[in-house]
Amino acid sequence: MKKRLIQNLSVNAIQLIINQILGFGIFYILSTGLDKTTFGQINLALAVLMAAFNILSFGIDQMVIKKIAAGGDILSILSLYIFHVLFAGIVFYGLLFSGHLWFPNTNNVYSLLLFIGIGKLMLFFSTPFKQVANGLERFRLLAYMSVISNLIRCFGLIIIALLHTLNIQNIVLIFIAGDITELLSCIFLFKFSTKTSLRLKWNRVNYFQLLRESLPQTGVVLITSALARFDWIFIGFMVSAIKLAEYSFAYKIFEISTLPLLAVAPLLIPRFTKMFQQGNIQIAELKLLVRIEMIVAAFIGLLLNICWTPVIDTLTAGKYGLINVRTIFILSLCMPLLYLNNFLWTIYFAQGRLKMILTSFIITFLVNVVGDIVLIPFFKNEGAAFAFLAACLTQTIYYLKKNEIRQLESVWQPLLFCTLCALLSGFISKTLFPGNWVVLPLSITFYVAFLFITKQFKPAGSAVIKQLFN
């Protein structure tokens, strides 16, 4: 079991590292090779499509993972999910395309929505195979499925950049080719690896039962999808494509820096589901897991702020570094909150408390939207980042208040201590050696020392974590 845990973590981490490297390569080529207006328009189209296709999942994706992990019939669940994505995806793109027919003189953003949307539709069709593989804890298979599109896009962009043909037409063609290839590869790899027949079994009663079970999660997906990219869309439409280019660059780096969370999160859903089904709640292991996550989150936030200006301005020739200093600082404060929120969300999801989760996301969404509407017109990108921070903090407070496991009432304490340790370490180091390379090693030294002083760092906890996943 320990060997399997290590394999799952390793495979998932490797897949995420590869995808994040490729994703950064794609982002870097586009951000440095295109002007800010065009780069901002592409990001606006991607933000709209990402939100739309996430909403169209209706929350069934997470429910599929849970059902498969609980031992549900693979072929039946897969068939229902495939039918759903085909129907929902075709209807959505049909409406999108009909808008072009009714209003042919569309702007650049709408044209990008139409063409990039073809590829995103193909990726949407591939989600059933990925989610079933996740529920089966076949993380090696999931890794192969998840890297193909980014591989083609990244290397395709490198080739056209070297050939000096980096233009919007070639970029769109490469995006579509990568997404179509990933769909075809997912079908082949799933069938070959799981030996599962792809004969679709339609069952009207079971489909609507699945929709009813996913209904609370549908609301969560609706809100989280809007929450994830509402700031991008608002900045793009209400401020300018240039400001969106700057904000999306900072936000993308922030997303990449959450790699450890992305590596652990898929492992927690099936594990926590089995834990609560069996009634074997391992409190000590859960509390240690939270503390480790907070240490990692605060440490990454510290590195992000210390290295931001010298590294990013060097990589982008001064386009996205100094101008985003305040934005990335505010976003980095969200990182420990995201880790804790994901931990608590996974517990509540495993417990089946979907209505409570829906309520939390409604509140979070309203805070974020009101914050964006009020702050972005005055503070632009910094306002969007602060609205996101306020939304994350609101969700954390709500989750803590709704906790029913008395022994986990103090899980917020590591977040506070680790965040303060990171802030203090960075402040002292920059005050002592402003603009000097020694700031980085010194801040790390201070951070580790403060963790020992506050008793957050306890090296003997590795055995406890292994027991959790055992």
Image (tube, rainbow, N blue to C red):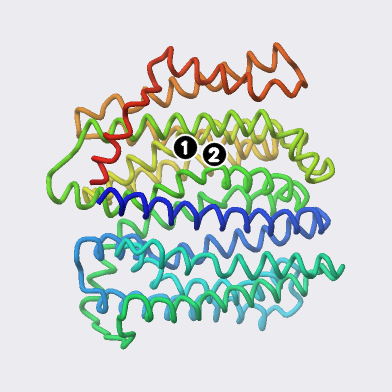
Q: Nearer the viewer, residue 102 or 284?
A: 284
Q: Residue drawn at (30%, 54%), measured in percent from left and top?
A: 4
**Which label is found at residue 6?**
none
**Which residue extends farthest left?**
279
The answer to which image quadrant residue 148 occupies is: bottom right
**How many numbered badges does the structure rendering display?**
2
In the drawing, does residue 403 fall left or right of residue 164?
left
**Secondary structure type for disc 2:** helix
Badge 2 is on which residue? 388
Q: Where is residue 23 shown, x and y percent of the image?
A: 62, 57
In the drawing, does residue 398 fall left or right of residue 428?
left
**Which residue extends farthest bottom?**
199
**Secondary structure type for disc 1:** helix
Q: Residues within 10 Å of mark 2 (few under 14, many from 20)?
A: many
Q: Residue drawn at (31%, 29%), measured in percent from left and top?
A: 461
Q: Nearer the viewer, residue 170 or 1?
A: 1
Q: CA distance from mark 2 to mark 1?
A: 6 Å
Image: 67 above or below 334: below
Image: 57 above or below 98: above
Q: Where is residue 51 shown, x and y percent of the image?
A: 53, 60
In the drawing, does residue 120 fall left or right of residue 241?
left
Q: Where is residue 127 shown, x and y percent of the image?
A: 43, 70
State if disc 1 and disc 2 touch (CB < 8 Å).
yes
Three-letter amino acid code at the position of disc 2: Phe
Q: Residues within 10 Å of mark 1 (few under 14, many from 20)?
A: many
Q: Nearer the viewer, residue 251 or 225?
A: 251
Badge 1 is on which residue? 392
Three-letter amino acid code at the position of disc 1: Cys
